[in-house]
Each structure stands twice: as structure tokens, then as C-alpha cells.
Amino acid sequence: MTYCVGLRLNQGLVFMSDTRTNAGVDNFSSTRKLFTWEVEGDRLITLMTAGNLATTQSLISLLDERSKTAADRDPSILREPTMFQVARLVGATLKEVISYSNSVGGEEKFRATVIVGGQIKGGEPTLFMVYPEGNFVEVTEETPFFQIGETKYGKPILVRGFDPEMSFADAVKLLMVSFDSTVKSNLSVGLPFDILCYETGDFKPTHRKRVETDDELYHRISEGWSLALKEAFSSLPDYTL
């Protein structure tokens, strides 16, 4: 399992993903789930994955290969004219990978979901959630963020705390609380976390960081949130039996 979130702010986009791929009492591993493609001055595309690891790795490898080979090997996400067309290409490629994997495996067991976002010159920054069937939906004012993977524990934090006017710093703090709540509730999500912030018009990452297991700020936020919840609970009116 995994947990990934993409937010659209007025300032730009924020992406965050965990790296845990297998979980158990004494058996877990980590792998990167946040990937970027850049063309200086023209585009930045970020993709996060959740689902069967073989499927997501095949998807990234295929997209990467097609972006680096000769022009006659189109389509390539580095040559698509809009983010909508990028989402269509990612969806078609994901469907292709899943169809091939299931035909080899003989059963419908290989599935994955993707968040893809970024900006291409001439368009606005945006986010899409791409489903295993290859179809997708775009972020809106009513739905300003997407989650994939283990979403239920962190969603209440985002729903109550998100504001499109917030700064990148506040957005990352909000995501850290959301991820911390998920980590404390489900062993299948864990550190390190990957963070990428993108400011509109930059066409390159504005801020990129990996939050390691010993990150002091993350632990201060985690402890501060736990304390704040206890204090808020104690301040609520007493229920009379």
C-alpha cells in the first residue's frame, strides 16, 4: 500500500508521497513513487503512483523510454501540447501495461492508480487522477486535491485544513499532519516521504525534499499535533449523562 497526495493552490502545485511498498511486523521495503520530467522553460510534469509495484514500475519505465528515444517513437509526454493530452497518454499507457500484465498472468490482479500534474507552457498548472481503466478526472475548485493509496486516515485533515490561498510552507505542514495520521493508523504507509512544490510559471521544481525517518521537523509536527488534539478534546463541552 502507499499514500500520495497532490494539491492545487493559487500559488501552484504540491506533491507528497510515501515510499513504503511492503509491510509487516518485520518485513517492509521502500521505493520511490514520485517522478518528474522537465523541459527547461517549457514544462514540468510530475507523476505519483499507487498499486501493484511491477505495474507502476513498468508504467514509469515505458513513459521514460518513450520520452528519450527517437522522434518516430511518439507518443511522448515531453511532446504532448497540453496537460490534458499528457493525462490521456498516461491513461493509455497505464491501460496498456495492465492489459499486458494481466494477459501474461492470466487473471485480473495487476492494477494501479496515478496522480499526474504539472504545467506546460501556454496552459495553467493542473492535476489529474488516472484510473486503472485509463480514464481520468481533473482537479476542480470543488475538488482541489487528489489522494491515492491508503486515503481514508489522512483525508479528514485535508478536508478541514486545506485553503487554496495557503503558502507552500503551510501546505507541506498540512500534508505532514495528514501523512502522520495515516502512518499512525496503517503500517503499510511509512517514511521516508518525498515532497515537491511547483510554483506557477517556473517550469522547474520550486522545492524538493525527502523527509527521512529521523527528520526533526516532522517529529516536532507529529508531537505537536498529538498534543493539540488532546488539548482541543479537553476544551470541548462535557457531555451530560
Image (tube, rainbow, N blue to C red):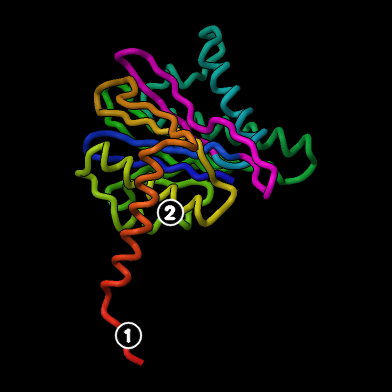
Please give left or right for residue 131 compared with residue 194 in the image. Answer: right
- Say what amino acid the circle numbered 2 marks: Gly
Residue that lies at the very extreme toward the left in this rendered image:
165
Q: Is residue 24 above or below residue 70?
A: below
Please give left or right for residue 140 compared with residue 113 in the image. Answer: left
| First-in-chain label (2 vs 1) | 2
Q: CA distance from mark 2 to mark 1?
A: 27 Å
Residue 46 placement (x, y as % from top left): 42, 29
Q: Which residue is mark 2?
A: 154
The magenta stretch spans residue 39:
yes
Say which of 119 and 219 sits in front: 219
Residue 97 placement (x, y as % from top left): 64, 32
Q: Which residue is mark 1?
A: 239
- Say what amino acid the circle numbered 1 marks: Tyr
Residue 40 placement (x, y as % from top left): 33, 13
- Give the mark count: 2
Mark 2 element type: loop
Q: Which residues are magenta?
A: 21-49
